[in-house]
Amino acid sequence: MSTHVAVIMGGWSAEREISLISGANVAESLRNTGHSVTAIDAAHDVGALLTRLFPRPDVVFNALHGHYGEDGCVQGLLELMALPYTHSGVLASALAMNKPMANRLFTQAGIPCPESKIVPRDEVLAGDVMKRPYVIKPLNEGSSVGVRIITGNNEPIPFEHASWPYSDVVMAETYIPGRELTVGVMGDKALGVLEIRTGEGFYDYEAKYSDDHMAEHIVPAALPKKDTKEAMRLALLAHQTLGCRGVSRVDFRYDDTGKGKARLFILEVNTQPGMTPKSLLPEIAAEAGISYDELAQWMVEEAACDS
C-alpha cells in the first residue's frame, strides 16, 4: 500500500554528509516502490522541521546519523507528535549512543566488552591511562568519528584541542587485535556476518566513506561455523538488551591472533545504520536475499512509536 513517507536526513552532526546520501538513496527507493516521499534536510531549527512535517506524513523514515538524530532527541520529538518512525525508540537510541552505559548493559547481559575506563581528556594528554596499545574515543559519536589508536611506545597522543572537538571526557579502551566484524539485525533475526578488511590502519570514518580509502567487505565472513553462530547470537542479544527495534548493525572485534580459542568483543550497536552505496547493512541484507528496496519497505512497514 502506498503511504506518504517523510525522509529526514542531513542534520548538523559530524555525519551530516553521510546522512544526506543515506536519505537520498532511501527516498529514491521508496519512490520506486510507489510511495509518496517528502525529503527533509533537517536544519538546527525545530520550528522549521515541524513545519516540514505538515501536511502530516503517515510515516517518518529517520535517515539521520549522529547527535540529535541517533541519540533519542528527534525520536522524542516524533513521539510527542505521535508520528510513527523507523529504527529504535528514545531509550534504546540514547543507550546505544552512550558507549559507557551501553557497555554496562552488555556486561550484565554476558556480552564480552573490551576493558575500558572513562578519564578526563587532560589526563590522557598527560600520559598513558592504560597499557599500550589502547583506543581512545568520544563517549557518544558514531561511524568511528574521533576514534584514535595509541600503539607504539614513542607515539604521541594523537589529538589536540583543535582536532578533538568533542567533550573533555574520553573513553579509553583496550585495543583488541584481530579482525573487524559486523552483524546486521532485522527485527528479531540476525541476518549475517560481514568482515571488513582495510589496506592499512583501522576502519575509521575515511575508510568507511572515502573513495581514496577503500575497504574490502567479505560477506559472509570466513569464520568457523560456531563463531559465525556466536557472533549472530551476541548481536541479537545486544539489540534486544538495549531494547532496539527495526534494524541495527552490531560491530565486533574477533581476536583469532593467539593459540587459544578465538574471542568476540562487542564494540557498539549502531541503531541508525547507513543506507549509502558503501553501507554494510544493505550488503549483509543482500547476501541474505533481501534487496535494498525490500529492506527500506520493511523498515517503513515496521515504523512505530514507543508509546
Image: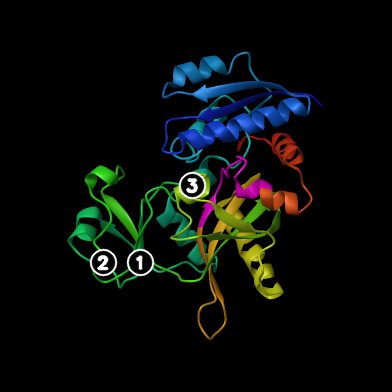
Question: How far separated are the C-alphas under marks 3 and 1?
Answer: 26 Å
**Position of the N terminus by quadrant:** top right
In the image, 160 versus 306, the foreground residue is 160
On the question of residue 207 being in view, the answer is yes
**Position of the C terminus by quadrant:** top right
Which residue ends up furthest to the front in the rendered image? 212
Residue 128 covered by magenta stretch? no
Residue 272 lies, with reference to residue 196, above or below; the image says above
Snapshot colouring = rainbow
Question: How far separated are the C-alphas under marks 3 and 2?
Answer: 33 Å
Rendered residue at 28%/56% (across/down): 158
Disc 3 designates what residue? 212
| Amino acid identity at mark 1 | Tyr
| Residue 278 position by quadrant | top right
Disc 1 designates what residue? 134
Foreground disc of the pair 3, 1: 3
In magenta, the rendered stretch is 268-282
Q: Choose the circle earlier in sequence order: 2 or 1.
A: 2
Give SS at disc 1.
strand
Q: Residues within 10 Å of mark 1 (few under 14, many from 20)?
A: many
Query: Residue 99, position in %: x, y?
Result: 43, 54
Q: Are marks 3 and 1 in contact (CB under 8 Å)?
A: no
Q: Are marks 3 and 2 in contact (CB under 8 Å)?
A: no
Rendered residue at 52%/63% (across/down): 266
| Amino acid identity at mark 2 | Val
| Amino acid identity at mark 3 | Asp
